[in-house]
């Protein structure tokens, strides 16, 4: 009785997952124990291996257990396009939603001086080197349209300008299927300001 | 490139958790990798240990890594009260919400002939033996108020009657803080039918 019961230890440990509070952690622990021990054993093994082996791609800084990630190592990906994103989730989202066939560069963050995140933490010296040595024809900036994402985007633009590369930014505006009535003010104002000539 | 990337394996493995779809699994995997490797390593270790070591208490069938669970092993718990519940969650809920100081018996399920769950699967022979050898004064039936829970409750009542034990069932009715207007019909009808004499 001295040690914490193992069930409580498991419930506590599950709370390291995002969005998992005490009730869900309890439900998860009991579900695994009562109905899916095999899944639990598998998860623990994969988790241990992933935590130990997954690092960053030395070219694009994306998460991978290899030295160079699958996208960077793929000779069929277009070297003339480089898309800069904030996080590995963004790579996954773009891969799933679009037919983009270029390469990526993952910042793993965004400029945020108050949190001590400057150009060095985002690997911008590495990006600058890459733009110098193997310049793409076009750099697509796909940081998030938040204050910090915009600041990062601005910094990237200034940096790329010195390398004579075409710089683009993904479009922001009213989402497809969205309704003007329910679109927030700043998005609608931005969409209005960035209107495009038809024809 | 032959093997599935480790990140995808981790995302897949996380989906064995209840209520975790592809998007949440992805978010969890990236959260652990980017922000909380230590938590991930800890989780994998505790998970492996729990899946391997947690079994059932030989007295009450609750989940525990010990031969006899902490509640059954506690000499200060009242042997004259025995509360029968469907699942380990119910034990946790009762322990957290009430001042109950008796023992438990965990069915780990409810009678459901269509799913092949009969008295044997619920350890009812073990319970019957316990009622025979160390009969409590009172058996509190706390199965859920669902069709199967009620059937289980009825079976338990019949079984306990042969042992000359006081049998009680936890009260069902309008929840505290609930409003009659929003209480479902069957609960309200039950509450009306089970009205108690005041004073």
Image (cartoon, coloured by chain):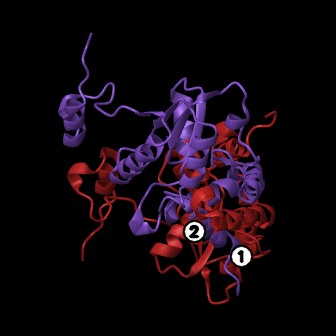
Chain colours: A purple, B red
Q: Nearer the viewer, residue B126 or A10?
A: A10
Q: Quadrant of the C terminus of chain B?
A: bottom left
* Residue at x-position 72% and y-position 43%: B9
Is label 1 in a helix, a strand or a loop?
loop
Q: Are marks 2 and 1 on the same chain?
A: yes
Give coordinates of residue B172: x percent, y percent. Answer: 39, 59
Mark 2 — on which chain does it sit? B
The residue that disc 2 covers is B91
* Residue at x-position 57% and y-position 68%: B91
Q: Where residue B164 is drawn, which disc sits there?
A: none
The residue that disc 1 covers is B69
Q: Is residue B169 above or below residue A153?
A: below
Give coordinates of residue A140: x percent, y percent. Answer: 47, 35
Image check: A151 left or right of B98?
Answer: left
Question: What is the CA distance from the residue labelled 2 to the residue labelled 1?
Answer: 12 Å
Give whichever of discs 2 and 1 has the lower sequence position.
1
Mark 2, other Cα within 10 Å: few <14 / some 14–19 / many ≥20: many
- Residue B158 seen in the figure: no
């Amino acid at each position: 009785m001295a040690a914490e019961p193992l069930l409580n230890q498991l419930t506590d440990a599950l709370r390291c997952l995002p969005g998992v509070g005490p009730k869900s952690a309890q439900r998860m622990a009991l579900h695994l124990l009562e109905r899916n021990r095999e899944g639990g054993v598998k998860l623990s093994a994969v988790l241990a291996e992933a935590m130990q082996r997954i690092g960053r791609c030395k070219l694009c800084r994306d998460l991978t257990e290899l030295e160079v990630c699958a996208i960077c190592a793929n000779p069929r990906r277009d070297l003339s396009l480089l898309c800069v994103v904030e996080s590995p989730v963004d790579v996954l989202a773009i891969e799933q939603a679009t037919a983009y066939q270029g390469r990526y560069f993952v910042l793993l963050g965004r400029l945020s001086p108050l949190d001590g995140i400057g150009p060095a933490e985002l690997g911008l010296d590495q990006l600058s080197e890459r733009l110098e040595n193997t310049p793409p024809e076009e750099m697509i900036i796909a940081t998030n349209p938040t204050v910090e994402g915009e600041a990062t985007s601005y910094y990237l633009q200034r940096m790329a300008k010195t390398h004579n590369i075409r710089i683009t930014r993904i479009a922001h505006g009213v989402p497809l299927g969205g309704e003007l009535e329910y679109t927030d003010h700043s998005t609608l104002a931005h969409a209005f300001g960035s209107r495009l000539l038809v024809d």
